[in-house]
Amino acid sequence: MASQISQDTIIRIEGVSKKFGRLQAVDNVSMEIKRGEFFALVGPSGCGKTTLLRLLAGFETPDAGRILIEGRDMTGVTANHRPVNMLFQSYAIFPHMNVETNVSYGLKIARRPRDEIMARTEEALGLVKLSGYEKSHPDELSGGQRQRVALARALVMRPAVLLLDEPLSALDAKLREAMQLEMVHLQKTVGITFLIVTHDQSEALSMAGRIAVMHQGSVRQIAPPGELYEAPNCRFVADFIGKINLFEGTARPADQPGRVRVHTEKLGILELQGDAEGSVTLAVRPEKIIISHEPGGLEGQISLHGTVMDIAYFGGHSKLFIDIGAGQPLMAEITNSNRNGGPRVAPGDRVRCGWRAVDTLLLTE
């Protein structure tokens, strides 16, 4: 019997847990995924994201809780009878079959009419830009083209949900970036719900409409990319998503309601917006930091002196590592706007580093 869920919800996960021996791979996870959205699961190795994907696919069985897809309880429903298809990291295409046969294989197994098989195969190959490659074999294709074959084979079955397990990890950096954009466009074109698992935070940020961050089997935060990056709800999420500078401190309520005074060893006493008491972590993203050689160039901002230890050049921007006497160097990111190929600072330079108080994150977990 279908559960009462919103028509916008295609997947509902209710209190799902899974153990392997003593390892709690998934720990009481609950979430909803909307129809037609591009959703990502991210987290470090061993956090449970792939196990959760396999539970959705029907390759594993929950120890507790339940999974509903399109309002139907998947308890007891085998993988081949679920309205999902899975794209594996290895692509798993058949090396002895040509592109056309690989893509149409599932439809043939399902005994669809010949005309339907031909039409849907042609449509799927067109979607992934492989028209004209029907008779090619996998060993004649590039890594990116093989990945497109696997995508077409999944899409040709018209699943309600496409599950993607690290689908771009085998590609080189430039091709991976191009495929990220293509997959976003493809998802919007076909309108199928995409659920991707990746350990690459930048990949998730650039592709997904919402992201769930997992840690030790639990979901720590679910939010759109911008909110996840700019307003993480705990230290783990702040540190996992992108680069960040962290400072330990102790918070007490300030005289003004809605503000706190935070005592830190390196930054001194700061008054910030927030509601916290006791041990806290202050965090600031590297791109929020302004670097100045001028002694009075950062009035009205949180600022401190430091010495440039090292510079990592990335073309359009550089990352600076600055010794501020706190053990861990301060990271700052600056745009390389001049034409000499690098920033206007050098290792050994004494600089001032500053940022606005509003750009400081107050983390209580």
Image (tube, rainbow, N blue to C red):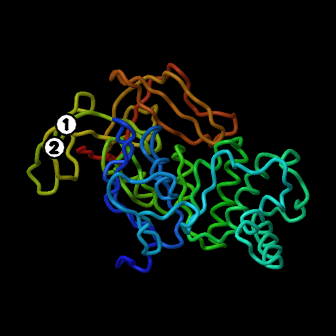
Residue 306 picture quarter: top left
Viewer-closest of 133 and 292: 133
Residue 165 screen position, x and y as percent: 58, 50
For numbered disc 1, what is the local secondary structure? strand
Horizontal side of residue 195 vs 250, given as left or right? right
**What residue is disc 1 on?**
269
Viewer-closest of 107 and 353: 107
For numbered disc 2, what is the local secondary structure? strand
**What residue is disc 2 on?**
261
Residue 16 screen position, x and y as percent: 35, 56
Residue 293 screen position, x and y as percent: 46, 31
Residue 135 visible at all: yes
Q: Is residue 245 above or below residue 97?
A: above
Residue 238 picture quarter: top left
**Residue appearing at x 16%, y 48% in the figure:** 276
**Residue appearing at x 18%, y 40% in the figure:** 262
- Residue kind at label 2, given as amino acid type: Arg
- Residue kind at label 1, given as amino acid type: Ile
* Residue at the left extreme of this rendering: 255
Quadrant containing the N terminus is bottom left
Quadrant containing the C terminus is top left
Asked if labels 2 and 1 touch by Cβ distance under 8 angstroms, the answer is: yes
Horizontal side of residue 16 vs 337, given as left or right? left
Viewer-closest of 207 and 153: 153
* Residue at the top extreme of this rendering: 348
Mark with earlier residue (1, 2): 2
CA neighbours of label 2 inside 10 A, class few (<14), some (14 to 19), many (20+)? many
Tag on residue 235?
A: none
Residue 290 visible at all: no
**Residue appearing at x 48%, y 65% in the figure:** 77
